[in-house]
């Protein structure tokens, strides 16, 4: 009896809610018209690709023949047979774990320090730190800096100082590739999140700091933890999302600097692997499985970080 | 607000870029409001908690021009017919105590003056807003670290510009100089003159990229702006859900969706056309996201007032909302330009004549060591455009980014 009446109540509630939503929707018809152009394009070029990607990941598809359903075979091959994928996963993971958090923390700390500079100096500093990531292709200058012969700038410095006797092949020797890549990616990591932080610091209510001085916040670190971080939470989450995105989507940098494919696949990342299967071998089903794995990992990462940030400053 | 604690004057209210509104400003103890002539409901109203600072308020006298700046950087400029004597309290609240001081520093200065103490002019510090809980040693250390990192960040760009200006003999000198001793523009002229006679002239790549960037950015601004407007200012079923999906899609870069995107493009017959690059750019999630977050700071009353005046939704969007969110435009422009300008488009465009600058750069680099100078020059051209746009619009962009947070 009890549950039945509860169930009925639930249904009436649902129905009322639906009716309310319907009136709201009718009253705001024009809104859908405004949203439509964006929504259609967004659906076509963002949602549909993700959905098709998940669909094709369960098929064998080489563009020429119709896709053939093969269940989770792609995923099994990916994990059990594809050694290069394991290298790619390992590299992506190393890059993401090192450049993601370090880049994120550095961009936060730099934004924090820059915030206390006088206005004109702050503007200069923001440009200097943000320029590498906005400049896109600028990273290819590292192919001159780290060039493998004696005319490479880094080699020449080391030769001059007598640290090495012969030029080192920074970009083609598997021993050094990852280190160089990580340096370059870190150089580019003051991205959108950094801007968001700089702006967020300027928006914090200054009276909160004054209240903090009265309450005995003794040094800058206490102030950072107890006042600054909690008021920056939304920016921190935005920055984290942008940071995860760039850390897991590393692709252009290794392709341009270390060659494609790189020696011994030492600079292969998940996304270059995906490119290889998708656009060189046309194994679309397999490439889609790689993409799907990447989606899932990124969404889980975002959830984890949102959970962590929820606890900051409490 | 009781009658006792309020001060009031008729005058005009102006938001930047929009027309003036005539009415009456009423300021009370906890907040202030602006009433349009003959209206009972306030046109805009805020409490002091939302207020960031006030400008143009003259000390010790009456004030007829007040700028109120809220924390979300919304600015209200009031021109009042009758000078208002603003009564201020220590904590900036208007009360009946006649202390016409706005900032705490001013307050202390005036108190000292009253007691007849010698007033020292505040010294101008290099670091202007010194917090009392900072140690000098810590400051020095931190700025030293900042300086070092700053040099490290800027070095590769300086090296790039240096390389593009090097004559051939300096490119292959040992040890390689960072900055050339005889700078020359030969590399740049080579790009346009020597390579101008090749199969596809360099200027063609440049024009392709300019075209794609301009059209893509313009369309993105309008289409994402319209969507952001309704998402930010109207409550309709599905709106919140849609925005949630867009926020999640911030994470998926073009690489991950590259393959299915290619399949869709080929279905639509857009492979090897500019549209393959332009249309997805119209729907870039980051632009919608930032625009929507920024538009939420616009006073809803502004839109409601225009609705009452009989303006259609598109007119409100076009002549009231868009002029008021200029900072957000600039931010959308910079992100859109950054994405489009740096696209290599190697997967969706085959015709050499339609390729982009970054693709051309990759080709030049593939030409090997002999092309080092030209590739640096091409790179400088590519890099300078987004950086220049950013430098010119920095302050507006930061204004937008202040509302970029994700509330989870």
Image: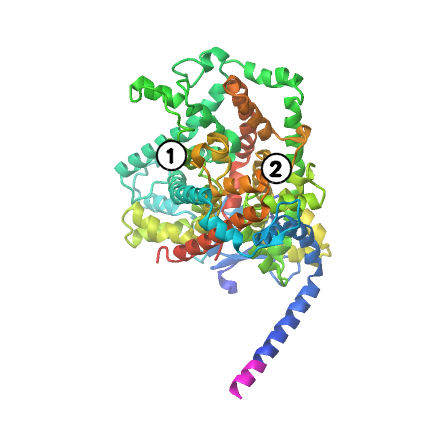
Residue A25 lies, with reference to residue B370, above or below; the image says below
Q: Which residues are magenta?
A: A1-8
Q: Which of the pair A18/B196 is nearer the observer?
A: B196
- Label 1: how many residues lie within 10 Å, few (<14), some (14-19) or many (20+)? some
Q: Which of the pair B74/B59 is nearer the observer?
A: B74
Task: Tell me the number on the disc at residue A179.
Answer: 1
- At numbered mark 2, what does the secondary structure look like: helix, strand or loop? loop
Q: Position of residue A83 (x, y in %)?
A: 44, 44
Residue A248 as seen in the image, left or right of residue A98: right
Main SS of residues in magenta: helix
Image mark 1: chain: A
Q: Is residue B236 visible?
A: yes
Quadrant in the picture for residue A124: top left
Q: Position of residue A188 (x, y in %)?
A: 45, 36
Residue B195 as seen in the image, left or right of residue B110: right
Residue drawn at point x = 62 percent, y = 31 percent: B356
Q: Is residue B221 visible?
A: no
- At numbered mark 1, what does the secondary structure look like: helix, strand or loop? helix
Mark count? 2
- Magenta run includes residue A3: yes
- Magenta run includes residue A247: no
**Residue for badge 2:** B347
Q: Position of residue B380 (x, y in %)?
A: 53, 25
Residue A3 as seen in the image, left or right of residue B179: right
Residue drawn at point x = 72 percent, y = 42 percent: B269
Q: Position of residue A180 (x, y in %)?
A: 40, 32
Image mark 2: chain: B
């Amino acid at each position: 009896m009890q549950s039945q009446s509860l169930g009925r109540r639930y249904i009436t509630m649902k129905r009322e809610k639906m009716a309310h939503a319907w009136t709201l929707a009718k009253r705001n018809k024009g809104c859908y018209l405004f949203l439509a152009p964006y929504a259609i394009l967004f659906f076509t070029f963002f949602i549909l690709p993700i959905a098709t990607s998940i669909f094709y990941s369960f098929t064998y598809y080489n563009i020429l023949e119709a896709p053939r359903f093969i269940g989770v075979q792609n995923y099994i091959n990916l994990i059990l047979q594809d050694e290069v994928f394991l290298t790619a996963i390992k590299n992506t993971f190393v890059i993401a774990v090192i450049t993601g958090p370090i880049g994120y923390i550095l961009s936060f700390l730099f934004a924090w320090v820059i915030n206390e500079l006088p206005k004109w100096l702050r503007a200069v500093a923001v440009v200097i730190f943000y320029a590498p990531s906005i400049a896109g292709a600028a990273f290819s200058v590292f192919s001159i800096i780290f060039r493998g012969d004696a005319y490479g700038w880094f080699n020449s410095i080391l030769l001059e100082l007598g640290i090495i006797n012969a030029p080192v092949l920074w970009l083609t020797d598997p021993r050094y590739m990852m280190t160089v890549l990580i340096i370059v990616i870190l150089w580019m990591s003051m991205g959108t999140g950094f801007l968001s932080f700089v702006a967020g610091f300027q928006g914090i209510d200054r009276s909160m700091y004054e209240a903090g001085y009265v309450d005995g916040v003794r040094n800058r670190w206490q102030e950072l933890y107890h006042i600054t971080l909690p008021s920056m939470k939304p920016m921190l989450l935005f920055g984290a999302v942008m940071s995860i995105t760039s850390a897991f989507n590393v692709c252009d940098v290794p392709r341009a600097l270390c060659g494609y494919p790189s020696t011994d696949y030492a600079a292969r990342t998940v996304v270059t692997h995906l490119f290889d299967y998708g656009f060189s071998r046309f194994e679309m089903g397999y490439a889609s499985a790689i993409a799907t794995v990447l989606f899932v990992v990124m969404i889980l990462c975002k959830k984890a970080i949102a959970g962590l940030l929820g606890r900051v400053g409490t | 607000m009781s009658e006792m604690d309020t001060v009031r004057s008729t005058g005009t209210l102006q938001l930047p870029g929009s027309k003036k509104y005539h009415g009456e400003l009423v300021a009370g103890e906890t907040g202030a409001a602006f009433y349009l002539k003959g209206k009972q409901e306030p046109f805009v109203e805020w409490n002091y908690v939302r207020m960031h600072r006030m400008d143009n308020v003259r000390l010790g006298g009456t004030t007829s021009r007040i700028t109120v700046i809220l924390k979300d950087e919304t600015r209200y400029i009031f021109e009042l017919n009758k000078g208002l004597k603003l009564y201020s309290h220590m904590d900036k609240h208007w009360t009946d105590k006649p202390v016409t001081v706005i900032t705490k520093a001013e307050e202390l200065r005036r108190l000292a003056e009253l007691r007849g103490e010698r007033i020292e002019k505040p010294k101008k510090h290099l670091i202007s807003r010194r917090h009392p809980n900072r140690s000098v040693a810590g400051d020095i250390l931190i700025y030293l670290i900042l300086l070092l990192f700053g040099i490290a960040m800027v070095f590769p760009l300086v090296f790039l510009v240096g390389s593009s200006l090097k004559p051939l003999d300096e490119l292959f000198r040992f040890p390689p100089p960072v900055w050339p001793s005889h700078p020359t523009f030969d590399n740049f002229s080579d790009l346009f003159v020597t390579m101008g006679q090749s199969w596809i002239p360099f200027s063609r790549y440049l024009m392709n990229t300019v075209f794609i960037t301009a059209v893509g950015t313009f369309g993105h601004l309008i289409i994402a702006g319209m969507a952001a407007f309704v998402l930010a200012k109207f409550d309709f079923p599905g709106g919140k859900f849609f925005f949630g999906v867009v926020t999640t899609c911030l994470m998926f870069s073009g690489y991950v969706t590259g393959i299915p995107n290619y399949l869709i493009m080929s279905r639509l017959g857009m492979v090897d056309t500019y549209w393959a690059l332009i249309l997805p750019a119209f729907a870039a999630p980051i632009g919608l996201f930032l625009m929507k977050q920024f538009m939420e700071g616009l006073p809803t009353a502004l839109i409601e007032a225009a609705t009452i005046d009989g303006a259609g939704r598109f007119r409100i969007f076009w002549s009231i909302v868009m002029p008021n969110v200029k900072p957000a435009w600039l931010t959308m422009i910079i992100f859109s330009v950054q994405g489009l300008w740096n696209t290599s488009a190697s997967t969706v465009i085959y015709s050499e004549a339609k390729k982009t600058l970054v693709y051309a750069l990759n080709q030049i680099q593939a030409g090997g060591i002999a092309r080092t100078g030209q590739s640096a020059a091409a790179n400088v051209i590519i890099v300078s455009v987004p950086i220049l746009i950013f430098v010119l619009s920095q302050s507006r962009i930061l204004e937008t980014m202040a509302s970029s947070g994700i509330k989870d």
